[in-house]
Amino acid sequence: MADLLRLENVSKVYSRGLLHAQSNVALSDFSLTLREDEPTILTVAGESGSGKTTLAMLLLGFTQPTTGRIIYRGRDISTLRGADKMAYRREVQAVFQDPFAVFNPFYTVDHLLTVPIQRFKLAKSKADARAKMEEALTAVGLRPEDILGRFPHQLSGGQRQRINVARALLLKPKLLIADEPVSMVDASLRATILETLRNLQRDHGVSIIYITHDLTTAYHIAKSIIVLYRGSVMEAGDVDTVIKDPQHPYTQLLVDSIPWPNLDQRWGAQPIKAREAGGGGSGCRFRSRCPQAMDICATEPPLFEISPTHTASCFLHHKQPEVAMERLSQLLPA
Ligand SMILES: Nc1ncnc2c1ncn2[C@@H]1O[C@H](COP(=O)(O)OP(=O)(O)OP(=O)(O)O)[C@@H](O)[C@H]1O
Ligand SMILES: [Mg+2]
């Protein structure tokens, strides 16, 4: 069975200062396999600075890994050229946080949709292009006759964000990376946009990586979840299990901080007391904040298999079998 996109032990380190004196590990030894035949919705969750956008940029090929490889359909993306590169650019699409950023105020919405049609030569004629735009807008629950011909300021934030999704959809992607797609739209529209994403996965076979700091939306939309903290995987697995029965002290703190009855309250609105744990250092990244830290936590914990669909990187579970990072995806239900 074909792997669409695979990250193999990818790390991203940002260096600063004289002779790269300061380095910041934004993502550490991360592996993930996305299969073509099993469209799924995977949440990548974590607080600000945990490496979520870095992961998105890597998957999109907008930034290169410091170590490790990213493989698209069997080939390292850094070696892709010509038609293969175009196919990758088309099949892996993104929707970002800010529904305003991609709009040029001087052009109608049509322009935003026409550009990818031309660039990727998706239509044979003007009529065909129009039909494709209408199809994509309808798929995200917008009425083309209401939307086409309008300028960005004549649309609501939620409409704009759905046009962004429609734009990605035009290209018939295999994978959509949605980085905080609803954090800038109001609560009433959040559900609509998340529903749109879910329909894409269900009806159009698009896999979605839903990036968020908000566990409640993750719980509603995703099948599986990876919890990141400062570039490392803390816990991963079936979203229901991880959120209802978290096994990593970090995830437990996150879940405890959600005021569950009020699902509109955003995770991170009441940050857990942040302690800037000094830069690098070895061992568990969470240990300086961990209420259950032990001496052994000065060593980097591997992933431990809690169940066939649940893994946590914490020595509290040292009696469980270890899981190699490369096997992470196998513990995420499709
Ligand atoms: N271009 C860059 N140069 C230097 N450091 C960077 C760069 N981009 C990100 N970082 C650092 O990498 C770490 C991870 O950043 P990233 O943007 O991936 O976090 P995030 O999880 O998306 O956070 P947020 O929820 O705030 O969007 C942070 O410490 C950040 O400061
Ligand atoms: Mg981010």
Image (cartoon, grey):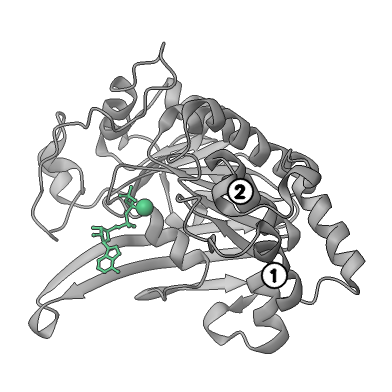
Q: CA distance from mark 2 to mark 1?
A: 20 Å
Can residue 318 be seen in the rendering of this structure? yes
Looking at the picture, tell me which residue is in the foreground, 18 or 148: 148
Vertical comparison of 92 with 278: above or below? below
- Residue 145 is situated, as x and y percent measured from the top left of the image, at 80, 45
Can residue 73 be seen in the rendering of this structure? no
Q: Residue at x 34, y 21 (%)?
A: 258
Q: Amino acid type of disc 1?
A: Pro
Residue, disc 2: 208
Which quadrant, please, contains the C terminus?
top right
Quadrant of residue 36 within the rendered picture? bottom right
Q: Secondary structure at mark 1?
A: helix
Q: Residue at x 73, y 40 (%)?
A: 142
Looking at the picture, tell me which residue is in the foreground, 90 or 107: 107
Q: Residue at x 61, y 64 (%)?
A: 107
* Numbered disc total: 2
Question: In this rendering, which labeled residue sits more in front, label 2 or label 1?
Answer: 1
Q: Is residue 295 left or right of residue 26?
A: left
